[in-house]
Amino acid sequence: MAYQWLLIENLDQVTTIALNRPQNLNALTDELLEELQRAFREVERDPATRVVVLTGQGRGFCSGQDLKAFGGEPGDRDIGHHLDRFYHPLMQRIYRLEKPTIAMVNGVAAGAGMSLALACDMRVASSQARFSQAFVKIGLVPDSGSSYFLPRLIGESRALEMALTGAMVDAETALRWGLVNRLTTPENLVEETRRLAHQLASGAPLAEAWIKREIRHGATHPLEEALECEKDFQILAAATEDHQSAVQAFFDKTPPVFRGR
Ligand code: LHQ
C-alpha cells in the first residue's frame, strides 16, 4: 500500500524512510504515526532491507507531535490513550528492530521527534541538526521513550538539563555529548550516512541482530548476566554458516560474504 506522509526508497539493501510533512518540520499526526508503524513493520519483514535510515524531508528532522492536530481542551484529550496507541508500539518497534537503524538528522529534532532519533541505533547529524526536549516548554514531561534513551546516551545530568530547560542543543554539542555518532556538513549528510549504512548492510545480519540484543541487555544487567547472555548469543553465532565462511575468507585473504545463515 502506498504512503501519503512518508517517502520510502530502497537502494542497495538500505531502506530510507523520510517523514514528509516539510511545511511544519514533519510534525507527527495520527496518520503519519500509523504509516510509520506500517513502514517499520514492512522493513522488518522485507528481505531486501538490511539497514533502515530514518530522516525528514525539508529543513527539519521532526518537530514532534503536531500540536495543531492534537488540539481541543486539555480535559477532552486522552493523552494516555494517544501515547499507548500511536507512540509506544512505534518506539518499541524501532528500538527492537532486528536490523540496524540510523537516524539521519538533517535539521531540528524536538519533543517526540527527538525521541524518534533516539530510538534508532545510531545518529548521523548535519551541522544544521539541533535537538530539544521541547516538552517542558509546553508544560509537559518527556515521553515516547526520551526518559529511557536520553540518560543512557548522555548521562543523567545532561539529560536532566535538556529535559528541565527544553534548551536547543546544537550539533557540535550533540557530538561532544555522544548524542550523535557522526557530524558532517549538510552537503555530505546523505553520503556519510550511506557509507555507514552500506558498511552495516554488508555485515553479518544474524550477528548484527544478536549484537543489538546483547548490547541492550548488557547496558541494564549485572556482569554475571551479561556474560551468560554473551555466551548464549556466541553459541548461536558460532554455529552460523556466516561465521564458518568468514573465517575461511580470512585465511583465504578474500572479503567475507554474509548470507544470513
Ligand atoms: C509545528 C510544530 C508542531 C505543529 C513546528 N506542530 N506545527 C505526545 C503526545 C501527545 C501530545 C503532546 O505531545 C507529545 C509529544 C511531543 O512531541 S510534545 C512536543 C511537541 N513539539 C513542540 O513543542 C515543538 C514545537 N515547535 C517548535 O518549538 C519550533 O517549531 C521548532 C523549535 C521545532 C523549530 O523552530 P523554527 O525553526 O523557528 O521553525 P518554526 O517554529 O517557524 O516552524 C515552522 C512551521 O512549522 C511553523 O508553521 P508556520 O505555518 O508558522 O510556518 C510552525 O507552526 C510549524 N510547526 N512545530 N510540533
Image: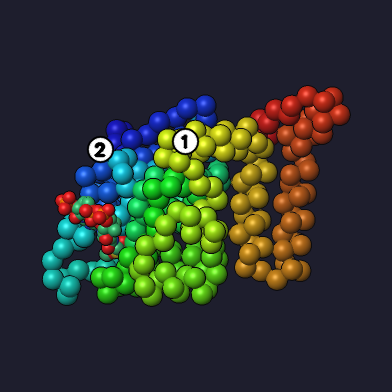
In the image, is residue 212 above or below residue 246? Answer: below
Q: Which residue is most to the right?
A: 251
Name the foreground residue: 59 vs 85.
59
* Quadrant of the snapshot with the N terminus: top left
Q: Which residue is mark 1?
A: 188
Q: Who's the residue at 21% across and 60% down the image?
A: 67
In the image, is residue 147 above or below residue 129? Answer: below
Crowd tier of the residue under label 1, counting other residues whose Cα lies within 10 Å: few below 14, some 14–19, many 20 or above: few
Residue 107: image x %, image y %? 36, 48
Q: Which residue is mark 2?
A: 4
Residue 118: image x %, image y %? 46, 56
Left/right of residue 4 with respect to residue 39 in the rendered view? left
Q: Which residue type does callout 1 highlight?
A: Asn
Q: Which residue is most to the left?
A: 72
Q: Can residue 139 be seen by looking at this rendering? A: yes
Residue 58: image x %, image y %? 30, 40
Q: Who's the residue at 52% across and 55% down the image?
A: 175
Q: Which residue type does callout 2 highlight?
A: Gln
Left/right of residue 171 with respect to residue 36 in the rendered view? right
Q: In 3D space, how far apart are the residues under numbered discs 2 and 1 (Cα atoms)? A: 27 Å
Residue 257: image x %, image y %? 70, 28
Left/right of residue 245 with respect to residue 217 in the rendered view? right
Mark 2 or 1, closer to the camera:
1
Crowd tier of the residue under label 2, counting other residues whose Cα lies within 10 Å: few below 14, some 14–19, many 20 or above: few
